[in-house]
Amino acid sequence: MGVPRGSVLMVTGRNGSGKSTLLRILATAIRSDHGTARVEGFDVRRSVQEVRRRVAFLSHHLYLYDSLSALENLRVAARFLGRDASRPALLPLLAEVGLADRADDATLTFSAGMRKRLALARVLLQPASVVLLDEPYGQLDPPGFRLVDGLLRRLRERGATVLMATHLLERGGDLCDRGIVLEEGRLAWEGPARELAARSGLDAPALVEGGA
Amino acid sequence: MQLRAALHKDLLLQWRGRSQAIAIFVFGATSLLLFSFAIGPNAEALRQHAAGFIWLALLLSSTLTLAESFQGEMEEHALEGLLLLPADARALYYGKALANWAQLTLLGVALVPLMVVLYDAPLPRAGGLLGIILLGAAGLSAPGTLYAAMTAQTRARQTLLPLLLFPLVVPVLLASVKATSLLLTGDPMGQLYAWTALLACFDAIHWSLCGLLFERVVED
């Protein structure tokens, strides 16, 4: 299967179906046992650094240092990316995810939702053309949901290609172009995201069994 | 650029975890105290063993320092996050190894006054002893950082790290103890240079080799 450049793909399927594994393979966090995957033409096994330069990944693991503050966590990433790591440059990012007033607090003191917001800010820091979001709505409150919606719209405007693993089919239906359902690591269904969302009363396995 | 970013990150993490560093110093100091009890109130014997025991205390404490240095990297898989940015694995290694070197050197320096007091050791030449501590700490830090990365994700890391590290750093321990002992008790045969040269060679080999191996360790 392929994902057209600049489109947003919703990836769904029941627990253990391989959604996170797919994203982790595309992000080069793990290597696939077999098969081939390419990101913007670069093989994820052979051209690891080329792929990594193009991909931003929101993982289940949030890639944060507990003992550092929110600002320091962003500063660490910004320094490695060769970006401006000054406070004035990073505060707007924190403001965007609603954490500007907690910029100097250790992330250890953050709730799960706040940690997720900080991880989203870290994704925004990366000038990536491919963005992989693994359960971006997880642990967020309703304003956090709207934050992710806004992020997806911004990424779409920027022309980024987005793959989002989620169980929230209704939400993804409005924001994604296409959807896929995975079943035991295999592509079980592919079609318009709205169609997938319209069947949101059905869980993904039922959708597959329904022969859609 | 990336090395500077890595070093800055690791020094900042060490600063934030300074309470842990203090606890490790207390552990080292307690080890020195217990070793002195093992010798008993024999001033001559205490002086003779002072160099050996300070390096044993530093070696034991180093496993805690090294293991701790990867704790923060593994809690939220932060190291993986840096590699995916992408950060250069070699820069990540050298940043961590340099920060560990600095911490072990500080620990070694902090244990010296205790050694002087507990073992009735003569006051050493400050510059010479600092040089040996720097070389010895570098010899523990380079392979120790690599092995700490290897064992960080294993369940038995507290046991595995010393099991892997101790046999490898036997030359560091021997050379550091001999060099320190010669510095404390005199060097009539002029052997100090040979032991420090051995330390420097060990450091050069391991600082080069471990930097190359680190990428394989964290990527596979």
Image (cartoon, grey):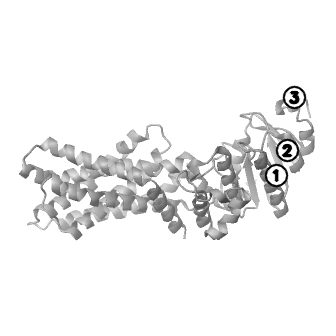
Measuring from the top left, give residue A203's x and y in whole percent: 84, 32
Q: Earlier in the sequence, mark 1 or mark 3?
A: 1
The answer for how far apart the CA atoms under marks 2 and 1 are is 8 Å
Examine the rendered structure and indicate whether residue B53 appears above or below residue A189.
Answer: below
Examine the rendered structure and indicate whether residue B39 appears above or below residue A162.
Answer: above
Quarter of the image where one finds residue B104:
bottom left
Measuring from the top left, give residue B14's x and y in whole percent: 44, 57
* Residue type at tag 3: Glu
What number of labels is visible? 3
Are the residues at dot 2 and dot 1 in contact (C-beta closer than 8 Å)?
yes
Are the residues at dot 2 and dot 3 in contact (C-beta closer than 8 Å)?
no
Label annotation for residue A171: 2
Pick whichever, B98 or A90, lies toward us: A90
Report crowding for label 3: few under 14, some 14 to 19, many 20 or more residues within 10 A (C-alpha).
few
Pick whichever, B126 or B18, lies toward us: B18
Q: Residue under label 1, please give it.
A: A149
- Classify mark 1: helix, strand or loop: helix
* Residue type at tag 2: Arg
Q: Residue under label 3, please give it.
A: A209
Q: Is residue B118 left or right of residue A106?
A: left
Tell which subunit mark 3 falls on: A
Q: Is residue A180 left or right of residue B193?
A: right
* Residue type at tag 1: Asp
Tell which subunit mark 2 falls on: A
The answer for how far apart the CA atoms under marks 1 and 3 are is 30 Å
Q: Residue at x 51, y 68 (%)?
A: B4
Q: Is residue B182 left or right of residue A190?
A: left
Measuring from the top left, give residue B204's x and y in whole percent: 35, 64
Q: Earlier in the sequence, mark 2 or mark 3?
A: 2
The C terminus of chain A - image quarter: top right
Tell which subunit mark 1 falls on: A
